[in-house]
Amino acid sequence: MDRRKFVTTASLAGATGLLSACGKQPGTQAACDNQTTAESFEWKMVTSWPRDFPGLGTGANRLAEAINNLSNGRLKIKVYGGNELVPPFEVFDAVKQGTAELGHTATYYWKGKAPEAQFFSGMPFGMTAQELHGWIYFGGGLELWREAYAPHGLVPFLAGNSGSQMGGWFNHEINSIDDLKGLKMRIPGPGGEILKRAGGTPITIPGAELFTALQTGTIDAAEWVGPYNDLAFGLFRAAKYYYYPGWQEPGAGLECMINQAAWDRLPKDLQSIVEVACKAAVMDGLSDFTYNNGVALKKLIDDHDVELRRFPDEVLERLGTISSEYINELALESELMGRIVASFQAYMDIVKPWTDISERTLLNLRPEF
Ligand code: CA
């Protein structure tokens, strides 16, 4: 090809054309380093949340927007609320099968599909948000999570955190562990398993169906997230007592799962953008929940006369024991699960004493400001 004609064609075609000129003439190295800049991608993100739902849906929207902006539009992500493209609990299969390239959800929903997954959003009585992030990013958690998702053709990232949740909405008081017996409660994932072992009946239904189920008495009790999200669904209109603490989810991580084949097609710089945007989404989400949980808690008490109740220590201690037994049993389920439990326990052995002398000490003695 004639050189002049080639250059003209290349400039018209943009950076993709420059790819062919790499190394052939001085000064093209910068262009070669950016050889992928013309390649663009349009991805679908399915979520387990109602569209634009405070904190969860809006967090997914902000993640998609950040990736779009950081990539200068080279990776455009269209966000779908639950049931818009697939139902909330089909996100795992939809991303696995490539119906959507990525999903924004929580790992404990996939307990039946990938039992190891439940650890990475956090376990009952387990890690706080801060501790979970330490395990995922520095304590070996992410490597184990990737290993657990690899057979499903999925690449996982932490992409949000609700922080500590609430224990849930009840229409009668919980004064002893016996009050949980026969209780039909919406509580998904490992928390549901613990309730079952305490004599209750856990039900897993998407958030959007929760209010009606609680109001009509299809279920006796329900946990969703915390004040911010529970206020948005108006759950205070369907139940009398609002219990704390959220023993089932002390720092629930949200995830962004990506279809492996779609991930492999991304150039390195876009992969980095996704990775860093997901990390930013963790901070963004936890900040959103921390502030707005405080605001919503005040509204629930001041404007809606919600009655707060603390689970009795006896109930919490029993649920804690059952949780520990459950985690130890899980270790026997598979070789990988054994390594995940070992990593979880080794991390807790190291980090719990630190949390205890630092934050726990201060939190117990914090003055009014
Ligand atoms: Ca929850």
Image: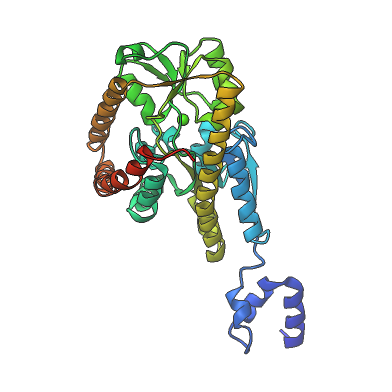
Q: Residue at x 57, y 31 (%)?
A: 296
In this rendering, the answer to whether 13 lies above or below 293 is: below
Q: Residue at x 36, y 53 (%)?
A: 143
The quarter of the picture where the N terminus appears is bottom right
Whether residue 359 can be seen here: yes
- In the rendered image, residue 25, in percent from the top left (x then y), is placed at 63, 88
Nearer to me, 234 or 21: 234
Whether residue 229 can be seen here: no
In this rendering, the answer to whether 177 lies above or below 113 is: above
Q: Residue furthest bottom?
A: 26
Q: Residue at x 56, y 47 (%)?
A: 101
- In the rendered image, residue 89, in percent from the top left (x then y), is placed at 51, 31
Instruction: Determine whether, in the image, residue 331 is placed left or right of residue 55.
Output: left
Q: Quadrant of residue 291?
A: top right
Nearer to me, 16 or 123: 123
- In the rendered image, residue 83, in percent from the top left (x then y), is placed at 61, 30
Instruction: Determine whether, in the image, residue 319 is placed left or right of residue 35.
Output: left
Q: Residue at x 61, y 68 (%)?
A: 36
